[in-house]
Amino acid sequence: MDTTEITSWIDANLPETMLFIGGLLALLIVISYVKNDESWTYRFMMFLGVIFGVIMLYEAVTMYGTWRMATSLFVTIAGFALVIRPFREVHFAVIFALMVMVLVYIGLGGLNGYMLFDSFDLTFLSEGWPRIIAAFLCGAVVYMIFNFAEAIVKLFGKVLNWWPLLMVLGIVCIVESAFMFLGYGSILDYIDSSSLGV
């Protein structure tokens, strides 16, 4: 098989290939975590998981409507679980809030002599305590919004990255890819047909 044949084969079997690799990475992450969660192997597996998880999420978004709904769902959940794992304890809300505070503080400096609707002078916001307070308030609002969003994302991230559940997710992805390679469609299709006695 030359490079062109491999590329065309992957293109023709993209969702099942992604599910297989994503499921395999999830299992390798679980194995390396259980063996030693401080090892470089575990960290390397997480790094690979983040890279491949981003690819999975990208493909799930760009191929939405082309793939089966069950396949898109499995790819999205697995991609999210792989991407979020290293970042479960990082407080992005604080980082974004600080960045907004700095940007607002810098931006307010340009209001010196600025008239709102040609009648309200905003110069007072460009200096001293009003400038600091306005930047702080903007940062606080951004922090509250992002903190709420971060809490929701981390809740799902912690649930999906609980290692027994991540192991199950990895197995489900591999089984789903095997069903697709063998022409059975999806696990859900097989369950539906089995329950109907077909």
Image: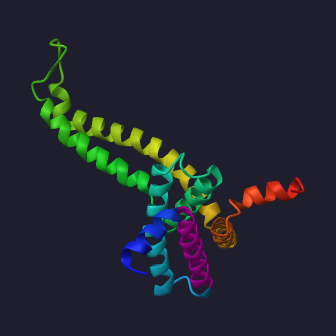
Q: Residue at x 61, y 54 (%)?
A: 73
Tell me which corner region of the image, top left, top right, bottom left or bottom right, holds residue 76: bottom right
Asked whether 7 falls inside the magenta stretch, the response is: no
Q: Is residue 189 above or below residue 161?
A: above
Instruction: State which region is magenta.
Output: 15-34
Q: Residue furthest left?
A: 113
Q: Measuring from the top left, give residue 138's x and y in whole percent.
A: 34, 38
Asked whether 51 or 111 is in front, the reply is 51
- Report the coloring of the rendering: rainbow
Q: Main secondary structure of the magenta part?
A: helix
Q: Is residue 112 above or below residue 135?
A: above
Tell me if I can see residue 50 in this picture.
no
Asked whether, in this view, residue 120 is left or right of residue 86, the answer is: left
Tell me which corner region of the image, top left, top right, bottom left or bottom right, holds residue 173: bottom right
Q: Residue furthest right?
A: 197
Asked whether, in this view, residue 14 is left or right of residue 173, the answer is: left
Q: Residue at x 48, y 70 (%)?
A: 9
Tell me if I can see residue 45 in this picture.
yes
Asked whether 27 falls inside the magenta stretch, the response is: yes
Q: Residue at x 82, y 56 (%)?
A: 193
Q: Measuring from the top left, give residue 104's x and y in whole percent.
A: 25, 40
Q: Measuring from the top left, give residue 42's x and y in whole percent.
A: 51, 82
Asked whether 177 or 23 is in front, the reply is 177
Q: Is residue 12 above or below residue 152?
A: below
Asked whether, in this view, residue 46 is left or right of residue 118, the answer is: right
Asked whether, in this view, residue 192 is left or right of residue 173, the answer is: right
* Quadrant including the C terminus: bottom right
Q: Residue at x 57, y 80 (%)?
A: 28
